[in-house]
Image (cartoon, rainbow, N blue to C red):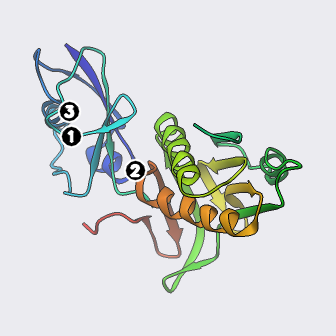
Amino acid sequence: MFVTVLFFAGARERVGTGRVEVNVADGGTLGDAVDGAIALVGAEYELPENVMLARNGAYADRSTVLSNGDEIAIIPPVSGGANGISDVWVTSDEIDADEVVSRVGSDRDGAVVVFHGITRDHNEGRSVLWLEYEAYSPMAEDMMTQIIDEMRDKWEVGDVAVCHRTGRVDIGQTSMVLAVSAAHRRPAFESALYFIDRLKEVVPIWKKEYFEGGEVWIGETPG
């Protein structure tokens, strides 16, 4: 049977391609497919321990048995029942913050918290030139929706909208806009902070920093 293995960010650069078709024996596992893909491209690359794997858009482990046509994703470390509306999307276009904010809030909500993620001109003593974001978009949107569900389990929030950018984002430009509405300010603030922290933990979106003298994937294991 044939499966597709996708590589992203630093993993993609190290194996030299973002997509490999692999022939796996019946009863083969996710680990078999990953090892086969790396061997097929002839790359000298060992997956770091903190790399996660996904099958058809859901996290899985190496022992997961595969089916013909499955899509496997190599997920390097990432940079971060509802009562309201949830709008989530990833785009390569410039973000219209007003559009994101317009999707939240109603007469029942007394607070709307908005977070803008903006490219700054410095990081860890380096002079930053621009950032570049890469995403496994379908899974990224699913995981952001899952985080919103987690927010709703913890706080009484109304509507939530989030848009994340991919591609080059220059200094001063917006990489993400998150808007959360709630009846009161505290759950709006606290749930927004929770979303941002969780996004950096589990959502497959990667950030590459271009600075004077070099470039680096932010959040990736050194080496």
Q: Residue furthest right?
A: 107
On residue 9, the disc is 2
Q: Distance between the residues labelled 1 and 3?
A: 16 Å
On residue 61, the disc is 1
Disc 1 vs disc 2: which is toward the camera?
1
Quadrant of the image containing the C terminus: bottom left
Labels 1 & 3 near each other (Cβ < 8 A): no
Please provide percent x and percent y for residue 74.
30, 42
Circle 3 — which element?
helix
Quadrant of the image containing the N terminus: top left
Nearest to the observer: residue 40 or residue 150 = 150
Name the residue located 47 percent from the left edge and 75 percent from the top edge.
213
Residue 3 appears in view: yes
First reached walking from the N terminus: tag 1 or tag 2: 2
Amino acid under label 2?
Ala
Q: Is 47 left, or right, of 52 in this rendering?
A: left
Name the residue located 69 percent from the left edge and 48 percent from the top edge.
160
Disc 1 vs disc 3: which is toward the camera?
1
Name the residue located 62 percent from the left edge and 50 percent from the top edge.
164
Please provide percent x and percent y for residue 3.
26, 21
Residue under pointer 3: 37
Labels 2 & 3 near each other (Cβ < 8 A): no
